[in-house]
Image (tube, rainbow, N blue to C red):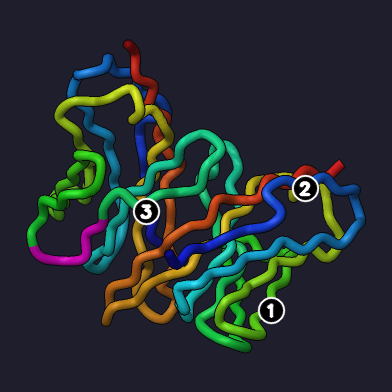
């Protein structure tokens, strides 16, 4: 079955280190997204991509970057991890049918920055 | 900018009782609306979605939601709650135009009493 996976599922890192979170989908979806989830804020969009070589900033993009070299993968990089980036990170990809778009989510990565 | 409000942070119901989770949106055009459920430690699972047509939408796990344009609402309902429904529920609306991004409410935590 097609799916979306994230790795690692849990990560502990230190302030100032570079961290990369992986996201891989096998649905062949063009659109992919990264969100962070924090108590009281729901999910907030970090970056998104509408296809290979396309990346766009979301609501909370400072300190994060993404690259899209193929359809299946959208890795999220924290350039220099900060304690404020401790969060749960979700990747999503979307199915588009005309004007109707539905996002499907991965299982999440729980990141702790010490 | 559009927003999504889930007025109830936490709801407790007894198993077998009916359930209604509220969702209000602020959006100028016709919205695309979604309900997702998140079990502890899991990703978000799509329950149902509304794009157009019949304003009463059926979803998985016995859930339904009704779009009421006059009230700017998309409330989620279930006639008889099961203990396994205990989870956090998120309402979301999609942007229009080129962005097509999801905006999430802050979530409603559902506790089910035996």
* Placement of the C terminus of chain A among the 4 image quadrants: top right
As drawn, A84 above or below A104: above
* Residue at the extreme bottom of the image, as rendered: A53
Number of residues whose C-alpha sits closer than 10 Å to that of mark 2, classed few (under 14), some (14–19) or many (20 or more) = some
In the rendered structure, are the residues bearing label 1 and label 3 in contact, judged by CB atoms less than 8 Å apart? no
Occupied quadrant, residue B41: top right
Chain name for mark 3: B
Chain name for mark 1: A
* Placement of the N terminus of chain A among the 4 image quadrants: bottom left
Residue receiving disc 3: B92
Please tell me the numbered disc located at residue B84: none
Occupied quadrant, residue A87: top right
On screen, residue B89 versus residue B72, left or right, reads right
Residue receiving disc 2: A11
Number of residues whose C-alpha sits closer than 10 Å to that of mark 1, classed few (under 14), some (14–19) or many (20 or more) = some
Q: Nearer the viewer, residue B68 or A25?
A: A25
> Taken as a whole, is the magenta stretch helix, strand or loop?
loop
Please tell me the numbered disc located at residue A67: 1
Q: Which residues are magenta?
A: B49-53
Is residue A20 among the parts visible in the rendering? yes
Q: CA distance from mark 2 to mark 1?
A: 20 Å
Residue at 54% over, 67% down: A33
Point out residue B28 in the picture as x, y percentages from the top left corner.
27, 65
Mark 3 or 2: in front is: 2
As drawn, A89 above or below B94: above
């Amino acid at each position: 079955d097609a799916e979306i996976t994230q790795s690692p599922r849990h990560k502990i890192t230190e302030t100032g280190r570079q961290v990369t979170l992986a996201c891989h989908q096998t649905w062949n979806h063009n659109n992919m997204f990264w969100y962070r989830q924090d108590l009281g804020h729901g999910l907030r969009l970090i970056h998104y991509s509408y296809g290979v070589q396309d990346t766009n900033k979301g609501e909370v993009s400072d300190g994060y970057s993404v690259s899209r070299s193929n359809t299946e993968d959208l890795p999220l990089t924290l350039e220099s991890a900060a304690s404020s980036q401790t969060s749960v990170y979700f990747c999503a990809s979307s199915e588009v049918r005309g004007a109707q778009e539905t996002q499907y989510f991965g299982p999440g990565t729980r990141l702790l920055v010490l | 900018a559009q927003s999504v409000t889930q007025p109830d942070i936490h709801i407790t119901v007894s198993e077998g009782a009916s359930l209604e989770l509220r969702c209000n949106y602020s959006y100028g055009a016709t919205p695309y609306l979604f309900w997702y459920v998140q079990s502890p430690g899991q990703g978000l699972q799509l329950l149902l979605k509304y794009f157009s047509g019949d304003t009463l939408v059926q979803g998985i796990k016995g859930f339904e939601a009704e779009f009421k344009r006059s009230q700017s609402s998309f409330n989620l309902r279930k006639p008889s709650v099961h203990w396994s429904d205990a989870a956090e529920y998120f309402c979301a609306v999609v942007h229009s135009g080129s962005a097509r991004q999801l905006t999430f409410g802050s979530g409603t935590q559902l506790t089910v009493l035996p």
